[in-house]
Image (cartoon, rainbow, N blue to C red):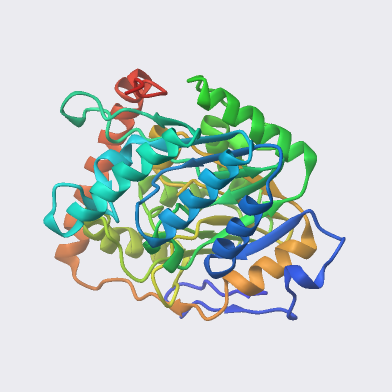
Amino acid sequence: MTTTTRRRSRPTLTASARATPSSLPGRSAYHLLTTEQFGPELLRRLAGARRQIDLQLMTFDGDRAGLAVADALQAAAGRGVPVRLLIDCFSHRFVSDQPVGRRAVAAEHRRTRAMYAELAAAGVRLRFTHPNGPANLFALARNHKKLYLIDGVAYLGGINVSDHNFAWHDFMVRVDDPDVGRAVAADFDASFAGRRRTVDGAIVTNRALARTFDELVAGARHRVVVASPYAVDRRLAEVLEASPAPSRTVVVAPENNFWCLQLIAPYLFHRLERAGVGLLRFPRFSHAKFLLVDNDALLVGSSNFGRHSLSCNDEIGVVIRDRGFIAAFEQEMLSGLEPVEPVPDRRRRLTGRVGAAVIDRSLMVYARTIAPLVPALAPDP
């Protein structure tokens, strides 16, 4: 696959020979699961679990998808499987990506709270990460990890448990590697005990993830592809502008549900285009995030790769260097992309430039002063 990123050209990604993870049996420890594939596999794995289930999520909503997973967790606990569940306190403020005070989600919010109570009553050990704090002071510092660990097999990626997450374009990677499984288990143990740590080994977390991202981009010889719905900010622009790779591409979602990113996008898209960075978008809303470097390194996990994600949140990822899997991943995740045209309106670009500077500076200050104060766990109810 090649990436065309000449200034003011229409960037394209041309697929190489067709390959899928299922065509590589026994040759890879990594298996790509799109959202359509992940839900059924998750339920099958939970139904067959025998030793241990650990799940850590940003959100877990009491809708059809959430209740199905909750039923599977309760059934596992009922047959004697130890089940632990970590959910971020973001879920106390938002359901289906809407504030819980809105009438449209009031019933779902009640179902979600009832679901949590039923899980705890069934023997699931449930804890919540990163309380929102007084006046929601801690709201920008989330534990943003998404991981599923079932009988030692780890799943890493960006999918939370809810109807809308299962409907988005996204993926999880199943990792059948005992070293990664043990590293994910150790990280979950620490998080469940309220210990925040940085890991740089079989997995990468928190500050190590930021270093790994920067080092991979700086070491690229041929190309860099960054995909994320929320990564386009001043930090990403600076890292890509400094990269020696002749081909650099950013893949974004066709729309964004954060007003601040809508505000700064015209300036940042223009800046990236002037720096020779190609801009592409998925044909439908995508929650997928990954970094592809040359043909031999792929970083996947929970991080959106922007300033907020890498400086304020707790995140987890894994660097994959299996070229066969990378080729299959590329074919699946980078097909059917569309060009993004930079916004010609100079006034909107100027407004975006000011907004990008203010947001970036504010996040840097928040990361230094407020984020370190956020407790890793909310008090038990």
User: Going by the image, does 226 lie left or right of 173?
Assistant: left
Q: Residue at x 63, y 42 (%)?
A: 149
Q: Residue at x 58, y 62 (%)?
A: 38
Give the vertical position of 4 relative to 79 (above or below): below
Give the vertical position of 234 relative to 250 (above or below): above
Along the line of sight, which residue is nearer the eye, 105 or 298? 105
Residue 253 in which image quadrant: bottom left
Q: Where's the C terminus, which quadrant?
A: top left
Q: How many marks?
A: 0
Q: Where's the N terminus, which quadrant?
A: bottom right
Q: Residue at x 79, y 53 (%)?
A: 29
Along the line of sight, which residue is nearer the eye, 378 or 218? 378
Residue 215 in which image quadrant: top right
Residue 282, position as x, y percentages in the image: 45, 73
The answer to whether residue 334 is seen in the rendering is yes
Residue 94, position as x, y percentages in the image: 26, 47
The answer to whether residue 247 is seen in the rendering is no
Furthest toward the right, the residue is 26
Q: Residue at x 52, y 26 (%)?
A: 191
Give the vertical position of 236 relative to 139 (above or below): below
Give the vertical position of 226 relative to 15 (above or below): above
Along the line of sight, which residue is nearer the eye, 305 or 68? 68
Furthest toward the front, the residue is 78
User: Going by the image, does 104 lie left or right of 357?
Assistant: left
Residue 40, position as x, y percentages in the image: 58, 64
